[in-house]
Amino acid sequence: MKSTKTADAIRASFQNRPATKEELEANRYLVNAIDTYRKRHRITQKQLKERLSLAQKSQAHISRRLSMRHETDDPMLLSELMTFYEAMSYCSAMETSLDNVLKEYNESFAEKVPNYQANTKDIQKGSDSILKGSDPILESDEFIPEDILPTFPSRIFKPSDSLTNSIEDPLFQCWFGVFHCYFYSTLSVEDRCFHGIMTIPEESNNGYCNVNFDFTYDNEGRRHKKYQGQLILSKKTSGAYCTLANCNDQGEISYLVMSNPAIKNKRVCCVLALVLTISGGKDTNHPCVERMIISREELNGDNFELAKSHLLLNDKFIRISEDDFVRLLKDEHIPDSFRKCFCRLSTPFEYPSFNGYLCQMAVIPEAWIKSLPGYSEREHQKLIDLMRLYSIAPKLNKIKQKAAENDIFDMYKDLFSKWDLPISDI
């Protein structure tokens, strides 16, 4: 009995020691071979779990095992590495053998050796500009058909404890489906709200959470802009990031930054996103930022008109002219008590003049409206939304090169002159 306990203690001590560099590399090769085979043969992690029949193991557990997400800066223990039995179980669930998986993985590298063009001197010096450690710079996407190649930015990072773009991650379940998107035109002369459709499919042929976006931009509904991209979620913050690329038609990439309600166990029903894009118009393309409403339900009617107030670039102050304020008080949706409240007050508008121009503008804190007695929280918000509809607030913000970049250049042109910068020959 004593010798058995001693053997168990020795075995436990051996299993709990940190893995060596060689053991980590061998384990990484084994895991990559299994996961590459799974992706190549279109086997999802959900299907793999069902075939394994591991009731005690979640899909997230399998995802971690096949992506090495448990790898951190802390040294890995030998007991954390994939065992021979575990590797054989995964292969058996994919109806193949471990020998076949390793053979196919090894042959894929032999057949698809990257044709790197490097300086001979760099190679002689042992430069790591071609290979970094034992991993090639280009990961093993060579054998994925070109029509389903992962789209940008799938290769910016590997799934980790901070960011995820894997379709198998449970965080994405709240995002699957069809969304209605509302945003203003980026043409300054056009006061138009577009209605787009965003689709986030549950199935993925490349392992990432793909996004499709489409909207019409003419009155007849014949001209479309179509984008494809990916959704990336942060596991540590409430951030959700979407990259949308139009490669064939407009040659444009737009970025959506928004909050992720799922991180707080909330449903993804309606989200407000900040959009970074290039403004439309002939010869008037500028970097531009605007807001977008993303909703599972299609918005229409009076409530939609109120909802559009959130598409404005609002802050905690409402800026409104006297003429627009008079129009606001005539709005049928304004309560009589609100009209009477202002009738009892002196005018909130000031009249400073400059060269004969009158500035009839009031700056009303949003907090002041919330402090008015006799209204519910929802009624306070409705008053704020109505006032914002009549307020002077921009729908978007552009960077105009002539007004900004040239001004900065003029300030420091003596310093810039020392740079012998090339000019594109177009």
Image (spheres, rainbow, N blue to C red):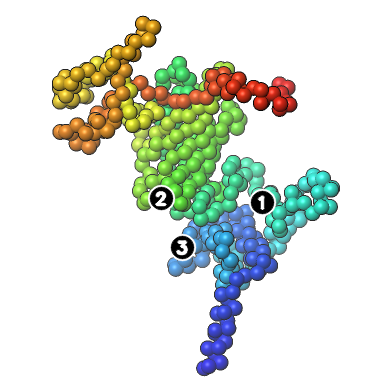
Circle 3 residue: 58
* Tag 2 residue: 263
Where is residue 238 shown, x and y percent of the image? 42, 46
Residue 219: percent from the left, percent from the top?
Answer: 44, 19
Circle 3 or circle 2, nearest the eye? 2
Residue sitting at 60 percent across and 58 percent down? 35
Front-most of residues 202 and 79:
79
Mark 1 sits on what residue? 139
Measure how far apart labels 2 and 1 are at the Cα level. Answer: 30 Å
Q: Position of residue 118 (x, y in %)?
A: 80, 45
Tell me the element at label 1. Answer: loop
Query: 129 or 115: nearer the eye?
Result: 129
Rendered residue at 36%/33% (across/down): 298
For label 2, the crowd category at 10 Å Cα-Cα, with few meaning under 14, some 14 to 19 and many 20 or more, is: some
Gap between marks 3 and 1, in whole Å? 27 Å
Q: Amino acid at mark 2?
A: Ile
**Which numbered disc covers residue 323?**
none
| 7 vs 342, nearest the viewer | 342
Neighbourhood count class around disc 3 (C-alpha, 10 Å): few under 14, some 14–19, many 20 upward: few
372 and 389: which one is in front?
Answer: 372
Task: Specify whether 127 is left or right of 257.
Answer: right
Residue 95 visible somewhere in the drawing: no
Query: Do residues under tags 3 and 2 come within 8 Å of each other at their CB atoms?
Result: no
The image quarter containing residue 20 is bottom right
Amino acid found under the numbered disc labelled 1: Glu
Q: Is residue 355 above or below residue 179?
A: above
Query: Quick one: quadrant of the C terminus?
Result: top right
Task: Give the amino acid type for the residue marked by disc 3 in the picture.
Answer: Ser
Q: State if disc 1 and disc 3 touch (CB < 8 Å).
A: no
**Dot 1, how many residues are within 10 Å of its Cα: few (below 14), some (14-19), or many (20+)?**
few
Q: Earlier in the sequence, mark 3 or mark 1?
A: 3
Image-quadrant location for residue 416: top right
